[in-house]
Amino acid sequence: MNEFVATVVRGLGNGSIYALLALGFVIVYKSMRVISFAQPAFMMAGALLVGYLVLSMNFFVAVLVALLLTGLLGAGVERLALRPMIGKPVFVIAIITLGVDIVIRTVVNSFIGLDIRQMGDPWGLRQVDVLGAKIDQRHLATLVTTLIVVAALFAFYRWSRTGLAMRAASSDQEVALAQGVSVGRVFSLSWALAAALAGLAGVFLSTGIGLEQNLWLTALKALPVIILGGLDSLGGAVVAGLTVGVIEALVGSYGDNLHPVFGGDFFLVVPYLLMLFVLLVRPYGLFGTREVERI
């Protein structure tokens, strides 16, 4: 039972990272109807900024400053690289986001170097006893922080004027424009939020183990998450992220009987198998909007 509790909490911690990344994907998709492949770059940029800022300030202050700067980077990318592409095919815009990702990650990797950069986080690899199980403090910190961020994000969308404007623009841009909503501002804010969420995910992914160049591959697991939860569902992104994290952790801990056939790292492909299954039986996701086309 102790091992099971530890495995579930570890899965929830990793799933929280997937959820933060997936929320960024969903926010951009809801505003522009395009999938942003630049999320891995924003994730790495946010973590790198914390790695440098923590040398001269408190860790938590460094995180707040880094997220602000990462959000500004996201807004700048939208304004300079994507705003001129409004009206172009969605495929073209998606390819541009892929190019943005490559450029930013190339710059970030040049600053990371070949060594692992420590984040200076207050918990490191320390553990705490929960119900008799040894739990990494970083997983608990990731889960609690994600829940707070998600609650704040939902409150922002539900009760703030800006959040209401973003919901209106995501529903119908032309009607929102007619009502005085600045759709361009919505685009910029959406990219800023998505970049900041990705940066926060990068920070928690790097705590304890440090930041290195290949960590961006973790961001790819957000793709199965948004397929499972639904491309246009914020709540689905959170539920799916936590679900994928827990299933991945359970298969990694208790899937020993699969190892002789699939190998010891079979848990790494579990998210993509879930994505394939969902695409076959429910392509719009568990919580996504089902689109009906009349022929």
Image: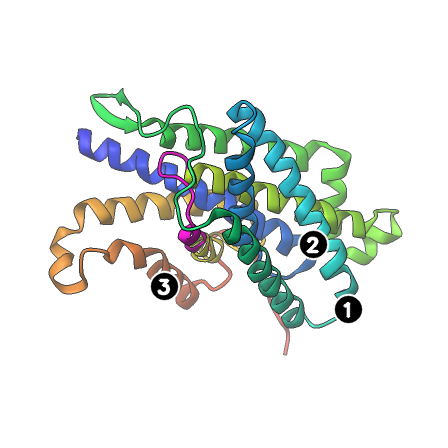
Label 1 Cα neighbours within 10 Å, binned few <14 / some 14-19 / many ≥20: few
Per the image, label 3 sits on a secondary structure element best described as helix
Residue beneath the point at 43% across and 57% down: 224
Place of residue 10 in the rendered image (x, y in percent of width and height, measured from the top left):
31, 36
Sequence-wise, which precedes: disc 2 or disc 3? 2
Magenta stretch: includes residue 208? yes
Picture disc at residue 77 = 2
Spatial separation of the CA atoms under disc 2 and disc 3:
34 Å
Picture disc at residue 179 = none
Displayed quadrant of residue 150: top right
Residue beneath the point at 50% across and 53% down: 109
Q: Are marks 1 and 3 in contact (CB under 8 Å)?
A: no
| In-image side of 15 versus 190 (left or right) | left
Say which residue label 3 marks.
277
Say which residue label 1 marks.
87
Q: Are marks 1 and 2 in contact (CB under 8 Å)?
A: no
Q: Is residue 137 above or below residue 287?
A: above
Question: Which residue occupies the foreground of this view, 47 or 228?
Answer: 47
Question: Which residue occupies the foreground of this view, 127 or 171?
Answer: 127
The magenta-colored residue range is: 207-218
Place of residue 53 in the rendered image (x, y in percent of width and height, measured from the top left):
56, 32
Place of residue 241 in the rendered image (x, y in percent of width and height, measured from the top left):
43, 46
Camera-near label (1 vs 2) is 2
Spatial separation of the CA atoms under disc 1 and disc 3:
33 Å
Q: Looking at the picture, which amino acid does disc 1 mark?
A: Gly
